[in-house]
Amino acid sequence: MAVVHQPDPAARSLDLDAFAATLSGELLRPASPGYDAAREVINTLYDKRPIAIVRAADAADVARTVTLAAETGVELAIKSGGHSVAGHSVTDGLLLDLGAMRGLHIDPERRLAWAQPGLTAGEYTNAAAAHGLATPFGDTGNVGIAGLTLGGGIGFLVRKYGLAIDHLVSVELVTADGRILTVSEERHPDLFWAIRGGGGNFGVVTRFQFRLVPVGQTFAGALFLPLTRDVLRGLVPVAASAPEELSTISFIMPVPPLPVVPEEHHFKPSLVVMFVHASDDIAAGRAALEPFRALATPLAEAAFPMPYPGIYEFTAEGGKRGNDVVRSLFLDTLDDAAIDTILARMAAPSSPRAMTQIRVLGGAMARVPVEATAFAHRDANVLIALLTAFEDAAELPIHESWTQAYFEELRPKATGVYSNFVADEGDGRVRDAYPDATYARLAQVKRRYDPTNLFRRNQNIRPAGSPRSAGPV
């Protein structure tokens, strides 16, 4: 069922009136106008009621809020876009909302951008596109840039340009002791390594500096293929051998009733290959798509020359609020056993809105050394995400059971997991996101910058030396 509200006992020690007077931003309480909207997150199963919501105006507000949480022991959650798969963007304690921090400066000559964490990927991408530039983010435009980046950032430019973190130059970050640091390869390099894949464990980022890459006109869209064993068998080899300009994210789902799809195919099982060919050579983009068309006669096609942000129109439905159960894993390939599992499960889903997402990786992402960032699954070939959306929250046990069983059938050959796609699945799944050496290094950085585990509403990495079974230390 939906998450039940449990008041934070530490709330009794908060003097909210005095604290509100120190802020440049806004403090919302349960009776305040806008409180309910501010506590909303994308997954409606996470229905919590913070004792207060700080809508920070600047890094100083963030530092004050972090210090208050540290001094009182109240649980602190950080919200950028509110898309945390595990529901970490909200709490019954103190919620720090970064949504009002939306500054963006783009220097097209130096190909650098300075962005605050309240921006969405779509807002940033549209602004950069005006200069024919981009930073690789994810696959949905309304996701906040902060959580997306700190976990890695795998999107429609991954094979050509790698992950979002591969373009991170520096950040301004508030640590657990309230300091405001500039973090880069030159300044606090251990912390800079950790935040590139280690999530929000180490502080609150109040400004990002990114490199921009040239992405203007692209050939992009969706190819609708029939869902057959042969099509699935050919998908990974074809996508992996495509030019690196072509990145794909495929969805096993019923064909939506779109104008480009003949009516006789509406709602039939399909493999929808969404793609971006990151080049203004449209002829090369069309040619790169031919091996996919050769897998089977397409049911329909919506592939056009378009500016890069246009691909977000194809995934807009995925950014809407609703009930969701998510499981995911990396695989080396789709072998016959995995294909059989996928076909059988998707033939009888627990929800008509259930989807299986397949991302074929490689390219630029794989060329970054494993030890260079905390995101260490550089050699991951295929990312599988099981996305079960449904209407009635009372049916959660049904959909959770179906999704978990599906995941367990695929799990024996898993090679890890992407931390941004991990639900609230326990410490073991957090460990799956990081090889042992990476996790040990992250735990040491955590002990240095957050020894009391203040930042624990995340895929939590406990400070080195603390018991794995313990709560906050």
Image: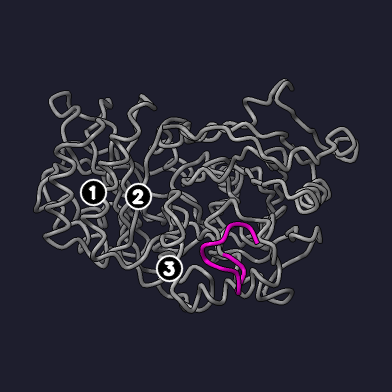
Q: Which residue is mark 1?
A: 406
Would you name the residue on which mark 3 appears? 365
Q: Position of residue 449 (x, y in %)?
A: 71, 68
Looking at the rendering, which quadrant does residue 20 occupy?
A: top right
The image quarter containing residue 336 is bottom left
Q: Nearer the viewer, residue 109 or 240?
A: 240
**Mark 3 residue element:** helix
The range drawn in magenta is 462-473
Q: Measuring 34% from the left and 63% from the top, which residue is drawn there? A: 361
Q: Is residue 469 magenta?
A: yes
Question: Which amino acid, mark 3?
Answer: Met
Majority secondary structure of magenta residues: loop
Quadrant of the rendering where the C terminus is positioned: bottom right
- Amino acid at the residue labelled 2: Arg
In this image, 435 relative to 350: left or right? right
User: Does the magenta portion include 303?
Assistant: no
Q: Which residue is mark 2?
A: 327
- In the rendering, which numbered label is found on residue 57? none
Residue at horizontal 19 percent and vertical 28 percent from the top: 267
Q: Earlier in the sequence, mark 1 or mark 2?
A: 2
Q: Are marks 1 and 2 in contact (CB under 8 Å)?
A: yes
Quarter containing the N terminus: top left
